Image (tube, rainbow, N blue to C red):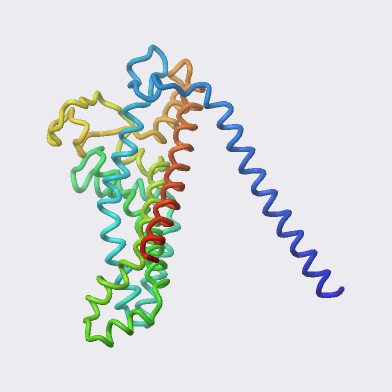
Amino acid sequence: MKPEKVDRLATYLILAGASLVGIIVLLLLGYLLVTGLPHVSWHFLTSSSESFRSGGGIRDQLFNSLYLVVLTLLVSVPLALIAAIYLSEYAPTNRWTELLRLAIEVLSSLPSVVVGLFGYLVFVLQWGFDFSLLAGAFALTILNLPLLTRSIEDALHQVPALQRRAGLGLGMSKWRVTTKIVLPQALSGIITGAILSAGRIFGEAAALIYTAGQSAPAIDYQNWNPFSPTSFLNPMRPAETLAVHIWKVNSEGLVPDARAVSNGSVVVLIITILLFNLLARLLGNLIQRRLAK
């Protein structure tokens, strides 16, 4: 067979496979949106689960998910940034460095339920955090750290080596070159990676069942004291996130309209994750344009 025909056949096969995957994803999203959007309303988004006779709203669960994303990023982003800077700028190429990279790859493939059980044994029991948002944030940091480290490291590697050599040639120290030249140029990729990881955090459920808890106690949104048990800012309170709420409603069977609540919650979850991805792309493109000027 001629090379032109082989190339054309391979192109058609690749396009057919990509189209099939795209159609499956679109059909799945369409089904979830069609079945869930009729159950989403402003009252559903802004009411607590106790405000309805049946399933209730998802205000508290939605806030808990967003708050948990913030707490997790506050812990994981500095750690991932330090690790990525070391691996990209300072780590020598030897057996120990390769072993460290292998450990990061293995850690990124851990099932979330295993991380949840580890978090339950360490953060909940050993460290005495009990079921709390902080314990959930530490557990999600373990899940988030490997992928976030790799994404930041890739962003640092995309900065041309010529810029590093130019800074060193001007007499700048290694740390000054990293902070004044490399990090600003990689800022777009760092922010994009952080926001994309936030989408994964927002949709996580298995690790939070054993760390953040399944209860949703009453939250006082007027109480700004983070040390108060009823304050919405208290990181030591147990909190049911949106993903855990979907699992709980479907598994317990105690809510009469469990299917409606679940479908509506799934739509909100999907739309929020899509917004995270869209925001990551918009911010990344905006920063790149500003740096290019």
Q: Quadrant of residue 286?
A: bottom left
Q: In the rendered image, which quarter is residue 178 located in?
A: bottom left
**Is 185 or 96 nearer to us in this picture?**
185
Residue at left offset 61%, top offset 43%: 25
Q: Position of residue 284 (x, y in %)?
A: 41, 56
Q: Which image quarter holds the C terminus?
A: bottom left
Quadrant where the image shows the N terminus: bottom right
The picture places residue 32, in percent across and down from the top left corner, at 56, 32
Q: Is residue 236 visible?
A: yes
Which residue is at a point 24% across and 80% down the rendered structure image? 174
Q: How many marks?
A: 0
Q: Position of residue 65 (x, y in %)?
A: 34, 37
Residue 107 appears in view: no
Q: Residue furthest right?
A: 1
Seen at 62% across and 41% down, the residue is 26
For residue 36, above or below residue 144: above
Q: Where 168 sits versus 226, above or below? A: below
